[in-house]
Image (cartoon, rainbow, N blue to C red):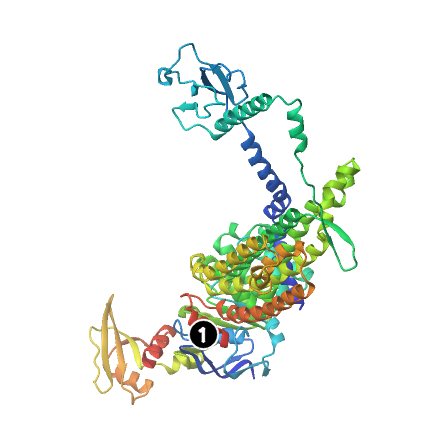
Amino acid sequence: MFFLETKALVKQYANHLALDKASIQVPEQKIFGLLGPNGAGKTTLIRIINRITAPDSGEVLFRNRPLAPEDIYDIGYLPEERGLYKKMKVGEQAVYLARLKGLSAAEAKERLKIWFKRFEILSWWDKKLEELSKGMQQKVQFIVTVVHNPGLLIFDEPFSGFDPLNTELMKNEIMELKNQGKTIIFSTHNMASVEEICDEIALIDRSKVVLSGNVAEIRDSNKKNIFKIRTADENLLADTSVCEILDKEQACHNCIFRVKKAQDISNSEFLSRLLQQNEIISFEEEIPSMNDVFIQTVTKNN
Amino acid sequence: MSKIGIIIGREYLTRAKKKSFILLTVLMPFLFVGLIMGIYFLASLNTDKAKVIVVADETGMYFPVLESTDQFQFIEAKEGFKDFRENSDESVYATLFITADLLEHPDAVTLYSRKQVVSSLETAITSTLNEYLSDKKLASYNIPDLKNIIAESKVTVKMKSIKWDDSGKETQTSADFASAIGMIFTFLIYMFIFVYGAMVMQGVMEEKTNRIVEVIVSSVQPFDLMMGKLIGIGLVGLTQFGIWMLVLLGPVLFGSLFFADAAMLQEFTAPFASVNMAEICIYFILFFIGGYMMYASIFAAIGAMVDSQEDTQQFMMPVTIIILFAFYAGFFSAKNPDGPLAFWTSVVPLTSPIVMMVRLPFGVPWWEILLSIALLFVTVLLFVKLAAKIYRTGILMYGKKPTYAEIIKWLKY
C-alpha cells in the first residue's frame, strides 16, 4: 500500500519527451528522495503530482485512488525557485496563500501566528517581504507550504539558501513532520542529505526512472567488492586469485590497503585467506555512497 | 469560484489601498484643472518691464496717438534724429520712423530693431494707426454720426441648435460641448486601457519572475488566477472612474450649493443637460469593461510570455499601434461623428471602445451601439480564451523568449 503512486506517466513537450513511462511508489509516512540530474524530468513529475500540468498518459494514484482536484488541498509544495510578493506584507500574503489552500481567513491567521512564533519571525508579520533577510524569507516560504497541514509534502531543494544553522533547523522540522505521520517527497542534488534523511528513492535520468527502492538496499546492491584492510606490516601478502590491490596508504605504523576481492569467493573465505598470511588490524567492506551510486547510474545510462 | 473571489480581493485591495493610488485619484482632476489654469496664467504674465520704443515722427501727427501700455512705452525721439543706428542705448527696444502723411503714403512707416520684434508690437502699432486713420478718413466725409451708424450696422447672428427625439422633445445642443465631452471620455478610456492593461502585464510578470506563480497554480487553476487578476485590476479602474465622475459631476448635481444665482446655475448646467450624461456614463462603463478585458487579456498573455521588461517591447508594439490608431481615429471622428471612418472604427471591436466614446454625445443609432457592444463582447470571450491558453503555458516557461511560431503551438495545446 502506497500513499502516492504514479503509473507509466508520459509527458511530451513540443521538442522533447519530458517523462517516459515514469512510475514511482511513495510509501506512507516515509521520506522519498526524488533524484536526478538537471533537466531529467523531476520538475515535470512534481508538477504532474501537483496537478499543475496534466500527463499525456498514465495515472497518479493518491491514497489508492486516482488523484482528484480536491487533493491539492492535501498537498504542500515548496518549489525549488522560491517566490513571494516582494511588496506585500509578510503576514498578509501568508494568509492569502493559506486561503488559496482552502483555509478560512481566521483559521489561517491563527495557525500562521503559531508557526511564526515557532520560527521566531512573528515580529516581522507586518513588514514587507523585501525587508526580510533571505533566510527569513525561506522560513516564511516553508511555513506557507505546511500551514494547511497536508498529508503529502513536496520539498524541492529545501535547503538551498540556508546557512548551516537554519539547514539543521529545517532538517529537524522535516523529520518532525515525518514523525507526525506525513509523507514527504524530497527532491535534491545533495546526496549526503539523501543518505541522512531519505528512506526510499527514485532516480530519474533522461525522462526515465532508472533506479528506485530503499536507500540502504540500493547502496548494498551497488557494492563493488572493494575492501579497506589495515595491516601491521608493510606488505599485504595475497594471491592474485583472491584479490587485487588497488591502493596503498601509509598510516602511522600501519598500512591501509584498498583491494578488490575476486567475485567467486565469499567475504568470510576472503578474510580467512588473508589472516593466514597477514596481521590484520581492521577489515571493512566499502559501501558506496549515494553520490557514487548516482554518478555511476547516470554515466552508465549515458 | 470562491478562489477567484480571494484572488480578486488581493488584486483589488493591494492596489486600491496604496497611498499613491488614493492620492493620485483624488488629486488628478485638480492637477489637471490646475495644469490648464497654470498654463493660462503663465501665458498671461507680462515680461518684466515695458519695452521702450523710440518714435521719430516727422509729421508730428501720430506720436500722440500711440499710447504707452504695460508692455510698450513710446517715447518721442530727439529733434533731428535721423539714423536709428546712432542710438546705441541698449534699453531701446525698437525705433519707429514715420516719414510722411500715412493717408497719402501708407508705406511711410518703418520699424527698426536689433532683434526680431515680437508680433504683438507690430499688431499694437498697426492697429492703433489703422483705427486712427480710418476715423480720420470717416471724418473727412463730413457726415454727422457716421461712426455710430457704422457701429449700429454690424449684426451678430445668435443661432440656437435644437435636437428633437422621437417623442418630439426638444433639447438645446452645443456641438462644441458634445465634442468636448466625447474627447474627454475617449481620452479617459484610452488612458484606462493603457494604464490598467499595463498594470495587468506588470502583475503577471511580477508573479512569473518572482516564481510565486508556481505556488499559486498548485492551489488554483491558472485560468482562475488570470481572471482574478483581470477582474480585480478592472475594478480598480472602475473605482477610479467612479471617483472622478463624482468630482466632475458633483458641481452639476449639487450645483445649487455652489451657485447662489439661479441663472448662473442654469447657464452652467444647461450644456450638461444637452447630452445625456447618465447614458454616456453607463456606455462608458460597458465599453470600458469590454475594451479593458479585450486588451488586458492580450497584455496578460504578453506578461506570461516574457521573462523581463525588455522582452515585452516586441510583443507590445503591434498592440500599441492598434490602440494609438484607435485614439487618432476617435480624434478625427469628433469632426465628423457620422462619417464612414467613425462608423467602421466604432463597430470593429479593436477600436470601437475608444471611438464610440467620441460619437456618443452626438447621438448614435441604437442598433449601431448594440452591434458594437455585441461584437466587442464576443471578441472579449475569444481573446480571454486564447489568452488563457498562452498564459497557462507561458507562466511556467522560463528561459528564452518564445517565437510567434511557438506561441501558436501553445494555442493548440
Name the residue located 26 percent from the left edge and 78 percent from the top edge.
A259
Residue at 68 percent of width and 62 percent of height: B365
Task: State the residue in front, A191 or B345.
Answer: B345
Residue with the most extreme top position: B79
Examine the rendered structure and indicate whether residue A176 appears above or below residue B107: below
Residue situated in front as seen by the camera: B313 or A193: B313
Residue A230: quarter of image: bottom left
Dividing the picture into quarters, in which one does residue B260 lie? top right
In this orientation, does residue B413 appear? no
**Residue A143: horizontal and vertical position, in percent?**
57, 61
User: Which element carries disc 1, helix, strand or loop?
Assistant: helix
Give residue A182's quadrant in the image: bottom right
Q: How many marks?
A: 1
Q: Is residue A130 above or below residue A271?
A: above
Q: Position of residue A162 (x, y in %)?
A: 46, 59
Q: Nearer the viewer, residue A196 or A61?
A: A61
Is residue B394 among what the camera can see?
A: yes
At label 1, the amino acid type is Lys
Left or right of B300 in this view: B149: right
Instruction: Give the residue at mark 1.
Output: A42
Q: Nearer the viewer, residue A279 or A27?
A: A27
Q: Quadrant of the N terminus of chain B?
A: bottom right
Residue at the far front in the pictured view:
B142
Where does the image place residue B226, in percent across and percent down from the top left?
57, 65
The chain containing the residue under callout 1 comes to A
Pinpoint residue B321: horizontal percent, then vertical percent: 48, 59
- Mark 1, Cα crowd under 10 Å, few <14 / some 14-19 / many 20+, is many
